[in-house]
Amino acid sequence: MKKFNKTGPMRLRRVIGNLRTQRRIVAILAVAAGLLPASTAFAVPLDLTTTPPASGTINGAIYSTIDRQPTGTGVFQPFLTYQANGIEEGYNTSQGGNGQGFLDTKRVPQWSHDLTVGDLAKVTIGGKDYYQFELDANEKGNGNKDRLLSIDNIRIYTSGTDTANLVGDGANIDDLGKLRYAQNDLGSTANWVLIDASKKEGGKTSGSGSSDLVVYVPTDLFIGALDTDLLYFYTINGVNSRADAGFEEWSAKIATGVPDGGSTLLLLGSALTALGFLSGRRGVADQA
């Protein structure tokens, strides 16, 4: 794994060089309630800080803003918690010690723990099934430049055996298992996503307690995976827009347990209806 070192000028220059040479144009898909976008702007990131709430696709997965409340830990039920200043990364596992896990993972095993494919519920958008993953970013408040955070890579793996120790803090993330979804190649942040952790419909919010991003990953990417297979969700944040505050949390829509009553889809409303209409088309950031 080409690991982003959080210290050291040589590694920092390497990251900056990588960003300059590997950036691709990613379209911003701004979806107004009940309307298809009138135009598409082009920029380096998939910018989800715009108003009205924005959505777009990267390699078949839908990335969209969301503002579901409350999402305190006990309600949100995260499977992955991680935190560091600047660049932060982690993957879910029940291993790695009591409290501190591998990389920047925290609160093991209660709020960073194993997850199986069979744990996940399916969400249907435009006739296509997805697995739903939701981020509660714990960044600073409205008016503070540190409210922004970049999601620089998400990579999802499945494995019939527990492979978390094969990766630990320094080995290749690909050793976690069969790669099912990748926002980027390892070491690349070409398809990065920018979110505003203070964004809230009709007001202001910051810190934990209000979700900020929802990612829908097509279930057909998991063909051949067993319900008993472990699912590893790896992510790295802060390469393009640094992490500055408390821990970030990811939760998943679970097939059993306390349902969210469909509130997530209601909040997205007609924006997802528009995305459902477009789901058969190639995503704005899809790779050839």
Image (cartoon, rainbow, N blue to C red):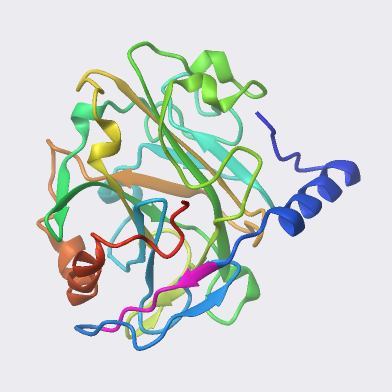
Q: Quadrant of residue 120?
A: top left
Reply yes or no: does residue 137 show up in magenta. no
Provide residue 274's location: percent of width, then percent of height. Answer: 22, 73
- Which of the pair 57/118 is nearer the observer? 57
Say which residue appears at 44% left-offset and 20% top-offset: 177
Q: Depth check: give the residue in front, 36 or 68.
A: 36
Corner quadrant of residue 54: bottom left
Above or below, comparing residue 24 to residue 53 in the picture: above
Residue at the (61%, 31%) spot, across then down: 103
For the point 22% across and 47% down, the residue is 130
Could you tell me residue 22's position as x and y percent?
69, 53
| Residue in view at x 89 percent, y 42 percent | 10
In the orientation shown, which residue stands out farthest toward the bottom?
Answer: 38
- Tell me which segment is drawn in magenta: 26-32
Question: In this figure, what is the number of numbered marks?
Answer: 0
Q: Quadrant of the N terminus?
A: top right
The answer to whether residue 47 is seen in the rendering is no
What is the x, y in percent for residue 175?
53, 19
Instruction: Indicate left or right for 81 with 166 as reference.
Output: left
Q: Position of residue 154 (x, y in %)?
A: 48, 44
